[in-house]
Structures are given as C-alpha cells and as structure tokens.
Image (tube, helix red, strand yellow):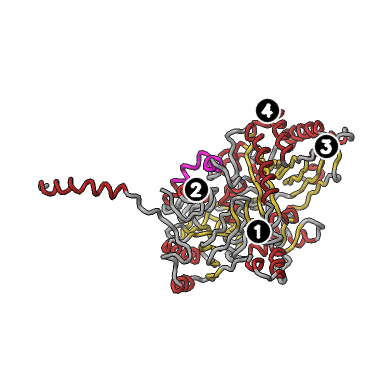
Amino acid sequence: MQRRTVLSGIAAAPFLAGRRLAAAPPFRRVRPGEPGWPTPAEWSGLQARLRGQLIRVLPPFAPCRSADDAACQALFRTLSNPYAIGDTAGLTQTLGWLDAWVSEPSIYAVAAEDASDVAAAVEFAARHRLRLVVKGGGHSYQGTSNAADSLLVWTRPMRAITLHDAFVPAGCATAPAPAVSIGAGAIWMHTYEAVTVRAGRYVQGGGCATVGVAGLIQGGGFGSFSKAFGIAAGALLEAEVVTADGRIRVVNECRDPDLFWGLKGAGNSLGVITRLTLRTRILPTWFGIVALTIKARSDAAFRRLAGQFMTFYAEHLYNPHWGEQARFRPDNALQIMMLFQGLDQQTARSTWQPLLDWVAASPTDFTLIPEPGIVALPARRLWDPAFLRRQPGIVLSDDRPGASPDNVYWAGNRAEAGWFIDAYESIWLPSGLLRPEARERFVDALVRAARHWHVSLHFNKGLAGAPDDAVAAARDTAVNPAVLDAFALAISASTAPPAYPGIPGHEPDLVGGRARAARVARGMQELRALVPDAGSYASEASYFDRDWQHAYWGANYQRLLAVKQRYDPDGLFFVHHGVGSEAWSPDGFTRLG
C-alpha cells in the first residue's frame, strides 16, 4: 500500500468515526399525509392485483359524533351481535381496554379472497412502509387486530371448510390421517357444524363459537374438551401462510419446520395464515354439562366449601372427561359450569353425588341455587344450530335480516360482544397444588383472592391430567411449557358493556373501572405469591404484563425470536407483546435503537 494512501486514511479516520457515531434516523412507518404514503394511483394499483376488494374503511363510530342519534343507537345494538361485528371491517369484538387501547379502524382493508390477495397486501405494506394489521375473528383482548393509520388484511371472506378422509402433509411420508382444511376467516361454530354435525367427527377448537379458527391456533388454543384432546395448535398438520417477503408457503413438519412450530402458539407475529389443516378425531358418544351454584352463608362455610370442592376435583374430576370452570365469588358463592365428554348422564350424575350429598348434609351452611343441572346429549348435537335453537336459553341468533340460520352463538357469550375490558389476568396453576400437603395452602390463597374479586379456575386450560398424546402434542408447540404441568388456568377479570370514549351516554366508566382493576390485581397477587414464577396464557393475559416474554412463552421465547428474525427480520408483523415487539415503539410505527 502506498504511504500517501495510508496517511490519507489516517487523516480521514476522525471524520469517519464521527459519522459512524452519529445516530441514524430510526426506521419509521408512514401515516396518511406523510411523505411516502401511497398515492391514489398506487392504491388503485393494489386493487388491480386483488381478487377481493380494497375497502376504504369508514370510522364505525362516526354516526355517534354527529347529530344522528338513531344511527348511533343502531350501531350500539349491532355491538350486541358478534356476527355483525365480525362482518364489519372497522369493528373488533373487544372495543378497548381501560388505560391501554381503544379500537380504531384501519385506513384501508384488503378483504382477501385467497392467499394471493394476502401476498399482494403484505408486499404493498412492506414496500410503502405501512403499519400492517391482520384480522380474522377480531377477538383479540390485547387489541392486536386493529391499529389506526394502518392497512388491514381482513381474512373474513376466506371461510371454506373441506374434510379429508386421508390427509398427508405436502412433502411428508407420514401415515394418512382424517383432517379438515379451514380458511383463515372461518369461525368455530361453522367449523364444528361441518366437522361434527355433518361429518360425525371431532376437531379440537375453541369454546366461544364466534372466535376465528386461525387466531385460536396461533394463540395455542383451548376448548371445553382440551383436557381430553389437548390444545388446538397440537392438532395442526399443515398451514398455508404468507410471510413478510410476500411468499406463499405451505409449511408442516417437513417444510419450514421451524416456522410451522412457531405458528403453533406464537400469535400472529410470524406471518398471515390463509388456510390450515387440523387432525380430526373419533367423536365421543356423549357431551354434557353440569351447572350449579352453591351459596355459603358465612366466610367460614365458604372456606370449607372451597376446600371440599378442590378435594372433590382432585379425586373425581382430575381426568380427561372434565373441562371448563368453577368460579369463586366475593359473595361466598361457588358457581360451577363444567362440561364433560365420554360419559352418559347417569355416570355424570353419580360422579357429582358425593359433593351434592356433602352440601345437603349442612343445610344451615349451604344452599343450592338453583337445583343442579346435569345433562348429557348425543355429541353430534352440541353444535347443531337447528337443535340448539329449540333449547330455551342456550343460544342466541344473528338477528340481521337475511342472516343464515346457522349463525348462532352461546347465550353466555353475549356479554363478550363489543365489551370493554377494565382488567384481565391469568396464571397457570401447577399440578403440585392439588397434592394433599399443598392443597390447604392453595385453598387459603384462593379464598383470599376471591375476597377481592371473583376468580375462575378453567380446568380445560391446563394439561395436567390429560392423556400422554395430548401432552406430547402440546410440548411440540411454542406455547409456554408451564401448560404441560398446569391443572388449570386461573382467570380474574372485570369487563363492561360496549363503551367508547367521547360518545355521550356510552363512555367507559374510568373511575369505577380503575377501582375494579385494582381489586383484580390484589386478588391475583394472592395467587402469584403462591406461584411466583407462573406463566400466563398469552390470549387471556394482562395488557400490562412486564415480563411478558417469559410469562407467555417461557423457555421457548429465544427460539421464537430466532424464527422471527429468519422470516420477518424487518418486523412487519408487529403486535403488542408479540414476538420481537420489544424492538418497536408501543404503537408499532418506530423501530427503537
């Protein structure tokens, strides 16, 4: 090297060092009106590439900000119908979370008809630096299916459901298995109707009938019978997914296995699922329900009741037959709503008789309100809309003119349509708490928690007590491994009817909501003190979790980050507390550092 070249390099070094030290502007996504926002011609170009429609999303609450009171009242009536919410691009099933977020519509939505529409939207968002949002069922409690100033990939039109007698994932040499392929916009009620009512098979899905299939799988997914059949993601055989590079991939254990694993529980942080194929199973002969409320007449009696029930659960219900929940309430009541599978009505009633006899033996301490209901029905009828509509008070129907008679949903889920969340917390409870030497301490903490706010134990959302194959399938997903040894998920929450800031007569109760949220936090702290390293179910967790990476995914998080870096290095698929979201501002528009 010539001396002059060396000296000139040395002379330039301080200048170059200074340039290296100067902070580059952070990567920012664009908003309407800013340089780089697509022109009308560019939006038209996107429409030209689509089979579906590019929709200019109208702000759904606009009528309430004008003098049109009749239209505003009609909108709030719509918010009681989950089917109407799902069919509206600008609405979400949850309207907001106190001091956290409020549902805001995207600017444009791609009503995707197929994977090529999704790919076009993904490529367009990446090229123009747009905030991208994905919505199927729109049930996200954490607000991940909406964002202001964004482009929405709306998968609702993709609802095809196809059954297979012998499915083999592409590129694999595995044994054929009965399965069902489901479009990303389908919901569970319609899926169960196709698989169970019409085909006489079972597919593990969600309990709420209007939840989107793809969203549930990406969250891990629990249903009423998960104690028998495992989490929904454990049944995934194959997925068609659009990744951040705009590629349409078919992934399974043999193709892109790391991405396939991540889709089973990582949330919608890795790509846009457009179709998924799930294993189906032999349908049990019977499904059934047990509904009763036991009211204790004193604090001491309630403590006895809680202890007796947990002993009864450990000895009689801690097995694959039983799921759903028991709620411990501040008014000294134990409210039981449990479902069962594989048992006839007489066997189910015999199972509960020891607890009923124990309650009857102390009439001055306990009251049954009302008489217990224990009912079994042929499993093929559980999601049969025609059958369900004939049963008083079980389901409600989509009341829009011309709506399909198949659009029914559980009456108990009515309160969740358009709700506003004050607080929502969950922790997995390890099976060791059921051991006799630990049970008393657990019951004491549970009762103390219920003094502050009601606490529900969702027994189907923990796989301790499940068959080995269900546990093994869940172990091969991205869900927090804590679920494998959990006998239940404890949930405490406060929610309110549809409300929206700035709408007179429909605004959230901020003062009351904060007081209720504080009570939820105090109650759950009683359980967290008992299980200090507890995990939380990402789809039903606090918006404000600080240690969310560990709480939601545990030891799986570092592996998920590696998958995220490989398939979405630029962070196109941002969601609150999603994989890699710590690298972004809370609104997902600015990369940090």
Q: Amino acid at mark 3?
A: Ala
**How far, Cα to Cα, is label 3 from label 2?**
45 Å
Q: Which label is found at residue 438? A: 4
Asked whether, in this view, residue 189 is left or right of residue 386, the answer is: left
- The residue under label 1 is 500
Report the magenta residues as a range: 547-561
> In this rendering, which labeled residue sits more in front, label 3 or label 4?
3
User: Which residue is depicted at the point 49% across and 70% down?
Assistant: 50
Asked if the stretch drawn in magenta spans residue 135, the answer is: no
Dot 1 or dot 2: first in sequence order is 1
Residue 166 horizontal/vertical position (percent)? 57, 56
Give SS at disc 3: strand
- Asked if labels 2 and 1 touch by Cβ distance under 8 angstroms, the answer is no
- The residue under label 3 is 296
Residue 546 horizontal/vertical position (percent)? 54, 42
Q: Residues within 10 Å of mark 1 (few under 14, many from 20)?
A: many
Asked if the stretch drawn in magenta spans residue 548, the answer is: yes
- The residue under label 2 is 579
